[in-house]
Image (cartoon, grey):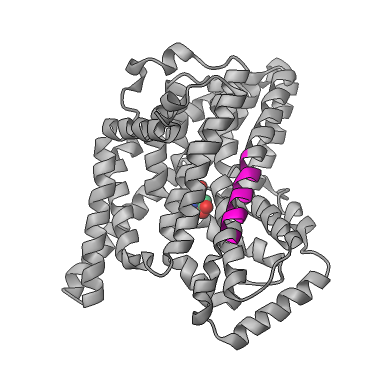
Amino acid sequence: MKIGMKIAIALGLGIKRNAHIFVGLVAGMIVGAVLHTNIINNHNPQITGAIMSILGFIGQAFIRLIQMVVIPLVISAIVIGIASVGDNKQLGKFGTKMVLYYGIITILAVTIGAILVCAFVPGIGVQSFINSQTSADIQAQVAQELTNTKANLLNQFLMFIPKNPLEAIAKGDMIPIILFTLIFSIALAKVGDINRPVVLFFETVFAATMKVTDWIMFFAVPGVFALSATAIADFGMSIFGPISKLLGILIAGFIIQLIVIYPLMMKIFSKVPILTFYSAVAEAMMVAFGTASSSATLPLTMACCERRGISHKVCSFVLPLGATLNMDATALFQTVAVIFLTQAYGVDLGLFQIVQIAVLAIIASSTSAGIPGAGIITIALVLNGLGLTPEQLVIGFAFLMAFERITDMLRTMVNVTSDAVVAAIIADNENEINYDLLNNPESYKEVI
Ligand code: ASP
């Protein structure tokens, strides 16, 4: 049997096990399609408006509830992750492997995205929608920028260092929070036994946060239902027509990641059975799709991985960092989207600019928080490298925005899967995986 088919079956089994969430998703899409027709035909505008508001409320409430636990979860997980890894040698190994595997996955993602978008040139179809004067202006501006010094990347890195960690926490700036927590946790590990009260405190915070997460997950079905319904109601199925080529390219890229790159990585670097593993993280994949938020899905990703055999040590170190920094699908999306925009505006790109876009997409994606829409916001950083801003490319952006939520849902699902894949590979390399548990159907009792 072909690997793709096997994975589809494994995912299918995951879906069967979580039929309630899947039903929520599909029902949400159907209701969304009906609402969209009502909106277009102006049928019962008041009732439709009221339903939209209620759905919007439920969806937002679900996202806010899960986001509520993200900061305490990330901080406590990293602290106990690093403190419980204990000896620095092992920590160093985890960290190096994490950077290596996340790096390989993301570089492959942007390469695949760049090849697909250059081969199929989806931007050409949009050229006729754009005023030729605007295109000429944009082309001139890009040319100008390319002769200037490259975008101010150093400044971007400076912002990662929090002047005040509490301010970063209050503002929810994930990268500065993580940077501070990492430094603080390494220091904690270094000071020896005196760290016990603080580590114990964070262990308690972690346990309580996981409990809160369990409670929140009672709302997964209505939450996922409401989120998918509002996405389809806003944008409708018909938007798939004119932009199907771009969407097709993105979906092809995501599928290649899911059914070629990740299985290959697992095969080359570990002996984790890919099908079993995909089935093990199916709930997290579906919730990622429904919430469009890696961070919001993090508690579930951790629960799936931990309850199915990956050690707490690895999960609590690799997954929180992955949920914030490892955004391979977002990087793929940004590469495709920016090259698509340059095609739409008739800007010719050389190999150097394509590589520059890909590199900036890797940086921009890892600065994206794991929340809905983060990738479309940080795309500004990639455009910045070409001397452009999103406002200048309004029409081109309208095409991206039309299906932003749907691609966001897809890229989040892929982002979350790669976090889990890397955690599994590292766990295998470091003997931190319990294969009896992973292969035991009993451990597949519902996580949600
Ligand atoms: N929503 C994505 C995530 O949470 C990030 C993005 O917007 O691409 O993984």
Q: In the rendered image, is residue 163 in sight?
A: yes
Quarter of the image where the C terminus is located: top left
Which residue: 55% across, 33% down?
A: 319
Corner quadrant of residue 188: top right
Q: Main secondary structure of the magenta part?
A: helix
Residue placed furthest toward the top: 436
- Name the residue nearer the viewer: 21 or 137: 137
Which residue: 34% across, 22% down?
A: 444
Residue 389, magenta (yes or no): no
Residue 114, magenta (yes or no): yes
Number of numbered callouts drawn = 0
Which residue: 52% across, 49% down?
A: 253
Which residue: 26% across, 60% down?
A: 32
Q: In the rendered image of this protein, does residue 420 appear above or below residue 25?
A: above
- Name the residue nearer the viewer: 233 or 103: 103
Quarter of the image where the N terminus is located: top left
Q: In the rendered image of this protein, does residue 62 appear above or below residue 244?
A: above
Q: In the rendered image, is residue 74 in sight?
A: no
Q: What segment carries the magenta color?
A: 105-118
Residue 322 point in image, percent of width and height: 58, 38
Residue placed furthest toward the front: 1
Q: Is residue 164 left or right of residue 231?
A: right
Q: Is residue 35 left or right of residue 422?
A: left
Q: Is residue 280 left or right of residue 253?
A: left
- Name the residue nearer the viewer: 138 or 374: 138
Residue 405 point in image, percent of width and height: 42, 58
- Name the residue nearer the viewer: 225 or 202: 225
Q: In the rendered image of this protein, does residue 256 appear above or below residue 40?
A: above
Q: Is residue 407 left or right of residue 156?
A: left
Residue 128 point in image, percent of width and height: 50, 81
Corner quadrant of residue 356: bottom right
Corner quadrant of residue 8: top left
